[in-house]
Image: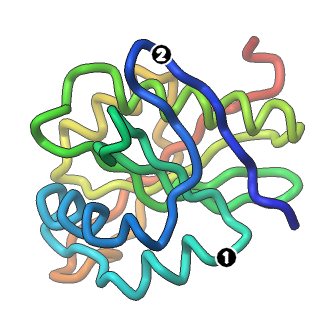
Amino acid sequence: MIKEKPELATGQVIVRNLFTGNLTEITEIERDSFIDPWPEKWFEAFILSDEISWGAYINRTLVGYLLATHTRENVHIVNIAVGHEHRHNGIGRLMMKRLYEFARRGLQRCITLEVRRSNQQAISFYQRQGFKQTGVNEGYYPGGEDALYFELELRGSE
């Protein structure tokens, strides 16, 4: 399978594939964003897979990333983060817009994700994007915190 090559640019932010050379920046953003960050080797494996691994770059500097899996029917967001100094500037929305375009071109039915119950900032972000909560997985995260499942229907939403 050929990896998607996003070429969406807005102003000075460019969304394109991540590379293993970005691992240091990715793990820094990850540690700054999540209480139980992924190890670097997980990011490396994801980047080398046929799944979606995109970065948001400003002047060739990685400022955010989005990882997702996809099937014929669905896209599942595995991880999305923006470095703290670049948050609230539309970078997350830009990466999500690119993902919506990818999913619609691939005729996927919906985009799904899970988020910690306590992550109100992320929940608000997804709700503003049109995601609806569809379920709960009790004790999903390390430490026993619940995961809230969200879904965005794509067919007929244009």
Which SS class for mark 2?
A: strand
Q: Give the spatial CA distance, label 2 vs label 1.
A: 27 Å
Tag 1: amino acid: Ser
Residue under label 1, please give it: 49
| Residue type of the residue flagged with mark 2 | Thr
Give the left or right position of residue 54, taking residue 1 as reference: left
- Element under disc 1: loop
Q: Residue at x 27, y 40 (%)?
A: 122
Where 60 falls versus 30 (above or below)? above
Q: Where the N terminus falls, by quadrant?
A: bottom right
Q: Position of residue 86 (x, y in %)?
A: 19, 32
Residue 7, given in percent of the width and then of the height, sits at: 65, 32
- Of mark 2 and mark 1, the one earlier in the sequence is 2
| Label 1, residues with CA under 10 Å away: few <14, some 14-19, many ≥20 | few
| Of residues 24 and 117, the one drawn nearer to the viewer in this rendering | 24
The answer to whether 21 appears left or right of 61 in the picture is: right
| Image quarter of the C terminus | top right
Q: Nearer the viewer, residue 21 or 98?
A: 21
Residue at the far bottom: name it.
41
Which residue is at 26% across, 71% downward? 24
User: Which residue, given by chain and number where applicable, does mark 2 sit on?
Assistant: 10
Q: Are marks 2 and 1 in contact (CB under 8 Å)?
A: no
Q: Is residue 137 left or right of residue 8?
A: left
